[in-house]
Each structure stands twice: as structure tokens, then as C-alpha cells.
Image (cartoon, rainbow, N blue to C red):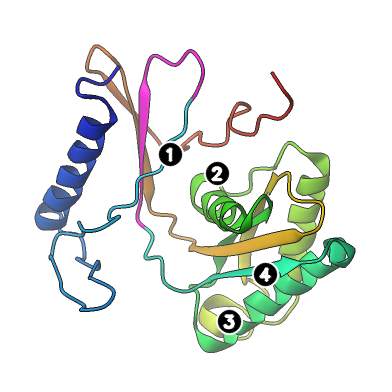
Amino acid sequence: MVEGGLVALERALRRATADATASIPLRPNRVHPLTRAHSNDNVGVHAPEVTYAVEPLADWIDVTAVHKGGLFGSDYRMLFPSDGIAGIKRFFVDTLIESGKRGLACQPAIVGVGIGGAKDTCVRLGKEAACLRVVGSRNPDPDAAALEDELTALGNYIGIGAMGFAGTSMVVATHVELAHTHTGGLPVGIHQFCLSSRRATARLFPDGRAEFRGDPGWFTDYYRRQGVE
């Protein structure tokens, strides 16, 4: 249990963001969207973005920081069920071609594809798949794993390579995550993450110990849970 609860935890994360911006330093990229007013500490309304997940029986807290600009390299489309996997592949290729030709992503990229759920769910899953999975890891669902391989091959076949130049190295890996969805739709969110993959995870224990690792361990069996129990 965190002393002060989630309010204290989020306050600490916001303070740490401001401190890191000043001391490392980090680029102060966050501004008010309308006035463009700048706080110079990366803290503001919904900034930094904090996402929570739970894990049964855990006596620790994992804190993962992901340095992601959040500008280009993402797209969303509501497909029809009849579009099927072929439609997902077409949207994947269309997105990579557009971002590659217009310089809207840093290729080679780790591409996350969120399929299903609601509109916001698939976009969130696509971003998490790109930013929080170990590069090249496989989805335990065999159909999703097969689609990951097919999409990576497609992405490296379209003729665009590093930073939009000609080549066959546009995609480092494709990570697919699924969510059960409404029977009438097939929402898909795509997110491209720079291959530098800037992130770090610390596991904090009640006795004050901290263990650091490269794998965020975000996509656990419980996180992907299905069924009633």
C-alpha cells in the first residue's frame, strides 16, 4: 500500500517529471494546446500521462517511464468485420507508406497494432504494444502471433527503409494486441515507436528496495485476461 494512496503516487510522479526535466535535462516539450503557454517542466493538464494497471497478489509497484513524443506515427480506422485480416493489412500498409513518404515516423520503427475494443481501446493497445513489449516478443494468441509476422514482412516489402529512404528495413518488429469488440465493427489503432525504445522500469518493494530492468512486464497473463474468473 502506498502511503497517501494514488494521489500521493501521482504527485510524486509529477514532481519527478519536473525534477528530471531540470536536472537531466529533458526537453520541455509540453505546452497548452490553445495558447501554447510553456511551463518548461513537462507538467500540465494530463501531463505527464499516467496509466495504471493491477496485478493480483503483488507486494510491489512497478514504475515504468516511457519517453515518447506523442506526435506523428499513429493512426486509427474503424473497419467493418467483413474487411477482416485483409483490411487490417491494407490499413497497416497505407499507414506505413503515408508516414514514410511524409516523414511522420522515425523508421525503422517498432509498430504496435491494437485490434478490437472501443475506439480509444485499440489506440491505447497499439501504443502500449509498441512501447511496452520487448522487441520481437510474440503475442500468446497464435492468430495474433501469425499476424505479427505477416505485418512485419509486409512493412519491409513496400520499399521504404530508414528515415524514409529506399530500403527494406522499415519495421523492426510488429506487436499485435487484441481486445474483444462490438460485433458490428473492427477498430484498429497503429502506433510507431522509434527503435531507440527509450524506457526504464523500476520495481519498488515495501522495504525500500528497487530493482531495475529493461522489460516492463506490462502484458501479463492477468492483463490479457479473458473469461469470467
Q: Give the image location of residue 222, x and y in percent.
A: 60, 26
Q: Which mark is residue 77?
A: 4
- Marks 1/4: CA distance? 32 Å
Which of these two is toward me, 59 or 119? 119
Mark toward the start of the polypeptide (3 vs 1): 3
Q: Residues within 10 Å of mark 3 (few under 14, many from 20)?
A: many
Return the residue at label 1: 214
Question: Disc 3 marks which residue?
Answer: 100
- Residue drawn at 62 percent across, 62 percent down: 189
Q: CA distance from mark 1 to mark 2?
A: 8 Å
**What amino acid is at disc 4?**
Arg
Element under label 4?
Answer: strand
Rendered position, 59 above or below 110: above
Segment colored magenta: 55-67
Q: Earlier in the sequence, mark 1 or mark 4?
A: 4
Which one is in front in this view, the residue at disc 4 or the one at disc 3? 4
Of residues 188 and 64, the one drawn nearer to the viewer in this rendering:
188
In terms of secondary structure, where does tag 1 sit? Answer: loop
Amino acid carrying mark 1 in the image? Gly
Q: Secondary structure at mark 3?
A: helix
Name which of mark 4 and mark 3 comes first in the sequence: 4
Q: CB under 8 Å between callouts 1 and 4? A: no
